[in-house]
Amino acid sequence: MKLLFCSSNIGKTQEIQYKFGESITIQNLLDIGCTEDIPETADTFAGNALLKARYGYENFNVACFSDDSGLEVTALDNAPGVYSARYAGIPKSDTRNMDKLLFELQGVKNRNACFKTVISYIDSFGNASSFEGKIEGEILEEKRGSQGFGYDPIFLPKGYTKTFAEMNLAEKSNLSHRSIALEKFYSFLLKNS
């Protein structure tokens, strides 16, 4: 089975392909020559994921899926939320996003946060389904690790001593918010294929 992932994020693509193994081949937008930056204009993760999946379905006429993920920090009224990727403005920059977040949390004791993912899938008939994953944790005061992407170097999952950026792909794949949503999505695909 082959599925189009409506994203050009190579890090996410690798995580998804690792999770699905050889049973499903994941192609992203770059693999099919699409360099379009799909607008994320919804105010929820679910809304943005559906917008991107619909773009893929309507433009390439294939079963496809997309995700929208983000970091919600309790002390910042759940910011950056849906603006996680462009928190420090355009062009997008993981480093500037983390630096801005760390600056805003200076002196703040409550550093509780969670990562959320919503996956939206549109099958070859145009039917949509969604799957959600969430993991609790906290924001560290400094970056640790060089793996992953996004806010991984400053996010410490609850009950763990390593940040996502200190984990290898297998470790992160076993517990991340995206992994939780992907497991639900994978089960759905197996039942409905």
Image (cartoon, rainbow, N blue to C red):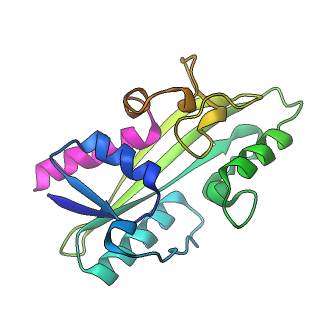
Residue at 79% in and 39% down: 102
Compared across the picture, whether 58 is left or right of 3 comes to right
Quadrant of residue 181 within the rendered picture? top left
Compared across the picture, whether 50 is left or right of 139 comes to left
Q: Position of residue 132 (x, y in %)?
A: 41, 47
Residue at 51% in and 34% down: 135
Q: Dividing the image into 4 quarters, which one contains the C terminus?
A: bottom left
**128 is higher (above) or lower (below) than 158:** below
What count of labels does the image hold?
0
Compared across the picture, whether 115 is left or right of 61 comes to right
Q: Nearer the viewer, residue 110 or 39?
A: 39
Q: Position of residue 97 (x, y in %)?
A: 72, 50
Residue at 85% in and 41% down: 103
Q: Position of residue 166 (x, y in %)?
A: 55, 26
Q: Nearer the viewer, residue 29 or 130?
A: 29
The stretch of residues the image draws in magenta is 176-193
Compared across the picture, whether 123 is left or right of 176 comes to left
Q: Is residue 153 magenta?
A: no
Predominant secondary structure in magenta? helix
Quadrant of residue 152 within the rendered picture? top right
Q: Position of residue 141 (x, y in %)?
A: 77, 28
Quadrant of residue 171 within the rendered picture? top left
* Residue sitting at the far bottom: 59
Q: Dividing the image into 4 quarters, which one contains the N terminus?
A: bottom left
Q: Is residue 179 magenta?
A: yes
**90 is higher (above) or lower (below) than 125:** above
Residue 29 in sight: no
Q: Nearer the viewer, residue 29 or 176?
A: 29
Residue 130 in sight: yes
